[in-house]
Image: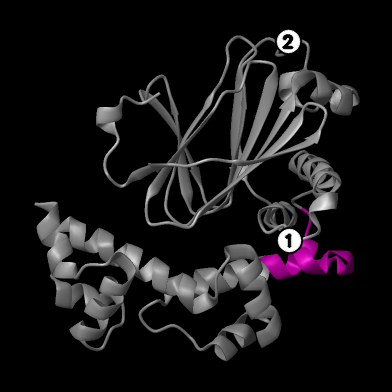
Amino acid sequence: MIPEKKINKSVAKGFFVETLADDGVFILTHQNETQEVKVIEREIDSSFIQFHFCVKGDAQFLFNNGNYTLNLTEETSLLLYNPQRDLPIHLEVKPKSWLVSVIISIKKFHGLFSQEANYITFLSEDNRDKKYYKDGKISPSMAIALNQLVNYNLNHSIRNIYFKAKAYEVLSLYFNRSEDADIEQCPFLVDESNVIKIRKAKDIVISRMAEPPTLQELANEIGLTLKKLKEGFKQIYGDSVFSFLLDYKMEVARKLLESGVHNVNEVGLKLGYSTSSHFIAAFKKKYGTTPKKYVQSLS
């Protein structure tokens, strides 16, 4: 645990929403929709394998009282396993970040993948007693399943069976060896193809944040209908296109102001605001203070 003196005022205690999906299988989800960093802790003993996924935003694992860290950035995954010692979760989750974790006992995992020991590195005879961690990208198909877990809105009575199905779907997709296939050519993976297009839309608005295209122009550019663009973007990123872009621009503004290289007017112009008053109003709505006062608070 981090000593209390190291936790600043902008850090708050958070928690996972935890679901027992099956015997020895837990799904943990967390949505930090605040402007604060959330610290989440949970004990995990050495008999479990941990799969962590950052659906949106950014988070950081802290080990050994913060002396060692591992980053978990948007659309990336992290597998953790150490049979020699417990690996409790100690996470710092950044604002506007979503996480999903699948925690499965090694006994259960062996039962699922016993025939694949030569394929799954840490199950091999030579490695079964060694610690193991692996980072990677979240595939489009995994992104769909993970977002369905975060945005679960079905009847509560079927939650456990739904989460059980999704837990095994996520694990099967994680170890799928054909993720490099050209999914754009496969008519049976229309949803996955759409995820790629939505991610392209996100990259486009970020790269042109000073002069973003209209929603219709964006839809035309990525090859989706306006309706699918709106619905898909909301499903994957949890916000409308322009609300997402505004949050992104304000985060860029905050970092530019902290650098001390640019004044308020320059930052506003860089982000595409025609007048400084518009930028100041947007910044104050987001952070509750003006850019000038924010800069003064840093000194």
Q: Residue at x 61, y 9 (%)?
A: 84
- The quadrant holding residue 155 is bottom right
The secondary structure type at the circle numbered 1 is: loop
| Residue 58 placement (x, y as % from top left) | 47, 49
| Residue 245 placement (x, y as % from top left) | 44, 73
Q: Which mark is residue 126?
A: 2
- Which residue, given by chain and number where applicable, does mark 1 sit on? 153
Q: Which residues are magenta?
A: 181-195
The secondary structure type at the circle numbered 2 is: loop
Asked if residue 212 lies left or right of residue 240, the reply is left
From the viewer's perspective, is residue 157 above or below residue 91?
below
- The quadrant holding residue 117 is top right
From the viewer's perspective, is residue 291 above or below residue 24?
below
| Residue 36 placement (x, y as % from top left) | 37, 51
| Residue 32 placement (x, y as % from top left) | 49, 52
Q: Residue at x 13, y 70 (%)?
A: 263
Other residues around mark 2 within 10 Å, as few (<14) / some (14–19) / many (≥20): few
CB under 8 Å between callouts 2 and 1? no
Taking the image as drawn, is residue 164 in sight? Answer: yes
The residue nearer to you, when weighing 29 against 106, is: 29
Question: Disc 1 marks which amino acid?
Answer: Asn
Residue farthest to the front, as pictured: 157
Other residues around mark 1 within 10 Å, as few (<14) / some (14–19) / many (≥20): few
Asked if residue 141 lies left or right of residue 76, the reply is right
* Mark nearer the viewer, 2 or 1: 1
- What is the C-alpha distance between the residues marked 2 and 1? 44 Å
Asked if residue 124 lies left or right of residue 58, the reply is right
From the viewer's perspective, is residue 92 above or below residue 117?
below
